[in-house]
């Protein structure tokens, strides 16, 4: 999945690379992250819990990448944090 500042493009890797993909403008001012304090607090708590779990499991600080889609959090990758030691 490619995410830009104002547009996103969902890519199905089964499609030929040259085939066009749908594009949609995203209005972030209408998302829970922008307008719902309780949502932001829950999300922050969940992200903190995930990062603690991953770092404890790996035994060192991690650079963690992921995405939030509706109410689901997806961990994409984790690698050792650079420049920490």
Image (tube, helix red, strand yellow):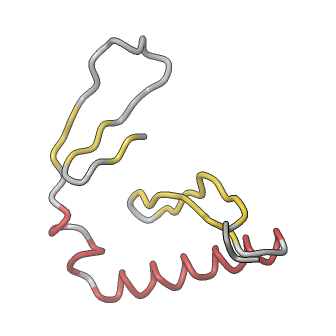
Q: Is residue 36 above or below residue 29?
A: below
| Whole-percent x, y for residue 3 in the image | 34, 47
Q: Residue at x 15, y 46 (%)?
A: 25
**Rendering quarter of residue 64:** bottom right
In depth, the one of 81 and 75 nearer the eye is: 81
Count of all numbered marks drawn on residues in the image: 0
In depth, the one of 57 and 83 nearer the eye is: 83
Q: Is residue 72 above or below residue 37?
A: above
**Rendering quarter of residue 53:** bottom right
| Whole-percent x, y for residue 29 in the image | 15, 69
| 15 sits left or right of 33 in the view | right
In depth, the one of 47 and 60 nearer the eye is: 60
Q: Is residue 45 above or below residue 8?
A: below
Quadrant, the N terminus: top left
Q: Residue at x 49, y 18 (%)?
A: 14
| 84 sits left or right of 10 in the view | right
Q: Residue at x 68, y 69 (%)?
A: 62
| Whole-percent x, y for residue 69 in the image | 41, 57
**Rendering quarter of residue 70:** bottom left
Quadrant, the C terminus: bottom right
Q: Residue at x 24, y 54 (%)?
A: 5
| Whole-percent x, y for residue 74 in the image | 55, 57
């Amino acid at each position: 999945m490619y995410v830009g500042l104002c547009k996103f493009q969902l890519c199905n890797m089964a499609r030929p690379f040259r085939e066009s993909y749908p594009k949609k403008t995203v209005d972030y001012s209408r998302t829970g992250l922008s307008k719902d304090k309780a949502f932001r607090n829950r999300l922050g708590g969940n992200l903190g819990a995930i990062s603690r779990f991953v770092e404890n499991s790996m035994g060192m600080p991690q650079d963690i990448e992921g995405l939030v889609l509706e109410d689901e959090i997806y961990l994409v990758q984790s690698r050792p944090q650079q420049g920490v030691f």
